[in-house]
Image (tube, rainbow, N blue to C red):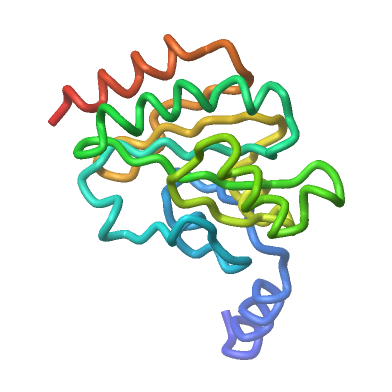
């Protein structure tokens, strides 16, 4: 291959759209850690998640199904804080849910105290290939996606996945 042909391929490749995360081989915590639209309840960091089982909860505060999973997430947060971390991704369904103050008020009302990334542009939603509220992504202690749970009424499944991953030490 000539140098100019190789350069043309590099330039053409640079112009291709970015590959979605799930089209790549291994989804990771990198997209949520790089969230850039703002955070509520603090910011999740690689250091705060290191060595923990991480539940990433993708939700919107007005969704009744999302509200149904919150009591279990609060219980998980309370009983397993040394081994488990929860990180929220708030991807709004309505214009009202895009307002940061409304999100903050609703987090307080629902007792959500873990870090929540604002995802008004659906960057994280797309990066993780989410297509429904709520979705929980469960990552092991090494940051590998091990379980995806879509919908509510699956507390037992989430708790079992967390327990199994915590036991893997």
Residue 156 or 138: which is nearer the viewer?
156
Query: How many marks do you count on the picture?
Result: 0
Q: Residue at x 62, y 56 (%)?
A: 118
Q: Residue at x 40, y 57 (%)?
A: 44
The answer to whether 42 is drawn above or below residue 124 in the figure is: below
Quadrant housing the C terminus:
top left
Residue closest to the far right: 95
Residue closest to the far left: 169
The answer to whether 162 is drawn above or below residue 131 in the figure is: above
Q: Is residue 95 left or right of residue 124?
A: right
Residue 102 or 150: which is nearer the viewer?
102
Query: Residue 51 appears in which quarter of the rendering?
Result: top left
Residue closest to the far bottom: 4
Query: Residue 72 appears in which quarter of the rendering?
Result: top left
Residue 155 or 122: which is nearer the viewer?
155
x then y, percent, for residue 150: 60, 22
Quadrant housing the N terminus:
bottom right
Q: Residue at x 69, y 47 (%)?
A: 91
x then y, percent, for residue 134: 63, 29
The answer to whether 128 is drawn above or below residue 37 in the figure is: above
Residue 138 or 45: which is nearer the viewer?
45
Q: Is residue 78 left or right of residue 7?
A: left
Q: Is residue 123 left or right of residue 71?
A: right
Q: Residue at x 51, y 27 (%)?
A: 148
x then y, percent, for residue 10: 61, 79
x then y, percent, for residue 3: 57, 89
């Amino acid at each position: 291959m000539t140098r100019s042909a190789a350069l043309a391929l590099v330039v053409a490749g640079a112009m291709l759209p970015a590959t979605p995360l799930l089209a790549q081989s291994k989804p990771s915590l990198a997209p949520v850690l790089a969230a850039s639209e703002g955070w509520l309840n603090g910011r999740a960091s690689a250091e705060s998640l290191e060595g923990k089982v991480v539940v990433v909860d993708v939700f919107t505060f007005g969704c009744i199904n999302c509200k149904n999973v919150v009591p279990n997430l609060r219980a998980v947060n309370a009983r397993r804080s040394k081994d488990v971390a929860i990180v929220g991704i708030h991807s709004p369904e309505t214009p009202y849910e895009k307002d940061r103050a409304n999100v903050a008020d609703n987090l307080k009302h629902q007792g959500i105290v873990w870090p929540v990334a604002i995802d008004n542009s659906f960057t994280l939603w797309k990066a993780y290939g989410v297509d429904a509220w709520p979705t929980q992504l469960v990552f092991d202690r090494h940051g590998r996606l091990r379980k995806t749970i879509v919908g509510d009424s699956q507390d037992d499944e989430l708790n079992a996945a967390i327990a199994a991953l915590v036991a893997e030490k």
